[in-house]
Each structure stands twice: as C-alpha cells, then as structure tokens.
Amino acid sequence: MSSKKAAAGTISGEFVALAALMMSLVALSIDTMLPALPAIGDDLGAGSPNTNQFVISVLFLGMSAGQVIFGPLSDHTGRKPAIYVGFAVFIAGTILSLYAWNFQMMLAGRLLQGLGAAGPRVITIALVRDRFEGAAMARVMSFVMTVFILIPILAPTLGQLLLVLSGWRAIFGLFLILSVITIAWFAFRQPETLEKENRIPFSMDRITAATREIVSTRQCLVYTIATGLIFGAFLGYLNSSQQILQVQYGLGDRFPLFFGLLAVAFGVATIFNSSLVMRFSLHLLVRLALAGLAVLSLIFLAISAALDGNPPLWALMLYLSILFFSIGILFGNLNALAMEPLGHIAGIGASVIGSLSTFAALVIGTAIGQSYDGTVLPLVGGFFLLGAAALGVTQLQEPS
C-alpha cells in the first residue's frame, strides 16, 4: 500500500486486512463483552439480566451520532485525520469503562466507545468507495467481511478466557492494546485516498443539503431502510444471545463455542457473495435473501410457538445458521446498493446512511432484546416481521 492510489480494479490483501481490522472495532467491542455481561451487571449494580443488554445497545447509540460527524469531517480533513480523531474518542471511552465503578459510568464509557468507533466504521466504507464502485465495491466489502467474520467467531471465546483469568476489566485492556496497534498500522501503511483538491469545507448547510439529496434519492433511501430493518433484527439477536444460549439453553461456558459456530455461517455467505456479485444482479441477490429469511422465520416461528417458545437446541442452531447465511449475503450488498449513487459525496453518504440505519437498528434491536421472556419467540418473530418489511420496502426500487 505504498502507492498513493491503487490501480483500477486492484484489490490489495493488506488493504482488505486493514479495512477489516478497523471495522472490527465495533464487532470486537460487542462480541468480546457478551460472556461478561452478567459479571458486569452484578459488579456494577445493573439490576436485571435484560438491563445488562444496555452495555451492548448503548454502543450503537454512540455509533449513530458519531457517523453524522465523521463522514463530513473526513470529506473536509481527509480520511486519515478523521480516523485519528475516532480512535482517540474510542480510547477515551475504553479507559472510562475500564475504571467504571457504577453501571451509569460504564454506559457513559460505552457511549464514547460507540461514538469513536463510528469514525473507522464509516470512514473505512468511504475509503473503499473512493477506490471502487458497484459490483467491485460489493466484492471488496465481501472480502472485508470475510476477514471481519473471524471476530465474532473468536471474540466471545477470548472474552470468556479473559473473564476467567483476570475479570471483565481485562477485556477493556485488550481494546486499548488493539486500538494502538491498529492506528499505528493505519498511520504508516495506508495512503490518503481523498486528495486535497477534492475536499469540501465542513458546514451544516452542506450536511443538510447532502442529507436532503440522500433521502430524496429513492435507491439510497430504500436500501438504507432495508439495512436498518435487518440490522435491527440482528441487533435483537446480539442483545439477547447470551440469555438465550447461555441461560435458556444452559450452555454455560460453551456459549462462546455455539456463538462462534453461528458466525461461521455468516462468514461462508460472505465468501460466496464475493463470487455471486460478479454473476448476478445485486437487486436479485438481496430480494432472494430477504425472501428466504422471511419465509424461514415464519416457519420456525410456528414451530417454536407450538413448543412454547423452546424448540430443541439443534433446531434453533439450524434455523439461525441458515438465517445468518442470508444475512451474510445481505449486509454487503445492501450497503453497496445504498452507496452506489453517492460517489460524489462518498464520505457524507456513508455517514448519513450509517447513522440512519444504525439508529433504526438501535430502536428495533433494543425493543426485541427487552422483550426477551425466556423464549425465542420475540427474536424469531422479529426476524420474520422485519425480514418481510425489508422485502416489501425493496420492491419500491426497480432494478436499473
């Protein structure tokens, strides 16, 4: 990555790895924490298992707000300075959480972590969009997600190990170390992708105008809404997965293993998707994946209801594996379709799309998680309703 700009169509392995690592800050900040939620709640006085979920969901509140800031900031200063600011805020939030003495302080630190993580999260997408577009961008994002998927496979086990050996505060120590390594790699190896002559002054008028353009562009709006709906269902799973797998199904210390196995299905889908996008329309792939998700969830909802919301573990794992395969197809393609018309405002485009979809997901996912009642019915019902809604929304956009 020593050259200022990669040749058209060239996909550098180092670029993919670095992009995946920067985007993984969010996944790492979530998945490593899952086994530690009961311990954090007990130590800091959360009050109830469902309240513990806010350690996860408040991170997304920070991300939603942060993405509005970091996209326009990166258009003004360049991608690299804006990412530096994001890492600084993330590290500050990590330190606050590390030394938290009550649950409110923990949530404040997590809010800052989300705010800071929004920087590398949204600007990495803009970095990719600076260099690629359309199917090529979707292919790069699929490669990024393939590397990224190692995080949810390995992170819960790592979190469990640190929890047993040193307690939950050691997890935040890990965040500090990895943040320093990542920002050093980025600083020395990633060239700036936004030339000075292409930068745009930071102003609220420009943000407002760009936002108006984005929400009035049907393709952007349709796929942003669809992303928010599917992401919301997935956040509902993240919020309640520890209670469902570790408590309801009694997996205990085996929870990270089962969580990681489900993440494999997501990774396999992203690998397949990198080839599928070169052969089939992105619109077709999205609609088939949404239809499959909705139909499968309806069937499994009926089965689960007949079993009082407690289907056998093998059936739940099979359902979720197929479901996450569909989601693995959706995430990269939905984002590529939403960003496709926005090459001239890539930074703020990624910012607004990410902020809107994350805020919608936060509201939806928190509602699903807080509805957890000792059964899988709120989760499966959420996937059915949101999958069907996303499928309906995408019908409003005709393929070009």
Image (tube, grey):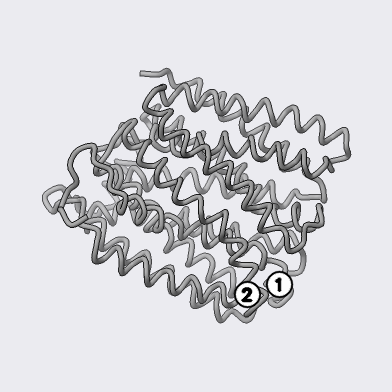
27 sits to left or right of 84: right
Pick the front one: 162 or 60: 162
Return the residue at label 1.
39
At 40% from the left edge and 29% from the top edge, which residue is drawn? Answer: 277
At 52% from the left edge and 44% from the top edge, which residue is drawn? Answer: 267
Query: Residue 274: percent from the left, percent from the top?
Result: 41, 35
Image height check: is 77 above or below 390? below
How far apart marks 2 and 1 lie (CA) works out to: 7 Å
Query: Could you say whether the residue bearing mark 2 is in a helix, strand or loop?
Result: loop
Image height check: is 223 above or below 349? above
Q: Is residue 39 visible?
A: yes
Return the residue at label 2.
168
Pick the front one: 159 or 124: 159
Query: Residue 87: percent from the left, percent from the top?
Result: 37, 67
Q: At label 1, which amino acid type do we have?
A: Ala
Q: At label 2, which amino acid type do we have?
A: Trp
Pick the front one: 35 or 305: 35
Figure quadrant of the N terminus: bottom left
Image quadrant in which you'd find residue 318: top right
Tell me, yes or no, whether the two marked residues, 2 and 1, touch with CB atoms within 8 Å: yes
Counting residues from the N terminus, which is met first, the one under dot 2 or under dot 1?
1
Query: Residue 264: percent from the left, percent from the top?
Result: 58, 46
Numbered-mark total? 2
At 36% from the left edge and 27% from the top edge, which residue is drawn? Answer: 278
161 sits to left or right of 137: right
Q: Is residue 67 visible?
A: no
Query: Residue 261: percent from the left, percent from the top?
Result: 63, 49
Query: Could you say whether the residue bearing mark 1 is in a helix, strand or loop?
Result: helix
Classify mark 1: residues with Cα within 10 Å, few (<14), some (14-19) or many (20+): some
Q: Name the disc covering residue 129, or none.
A: none
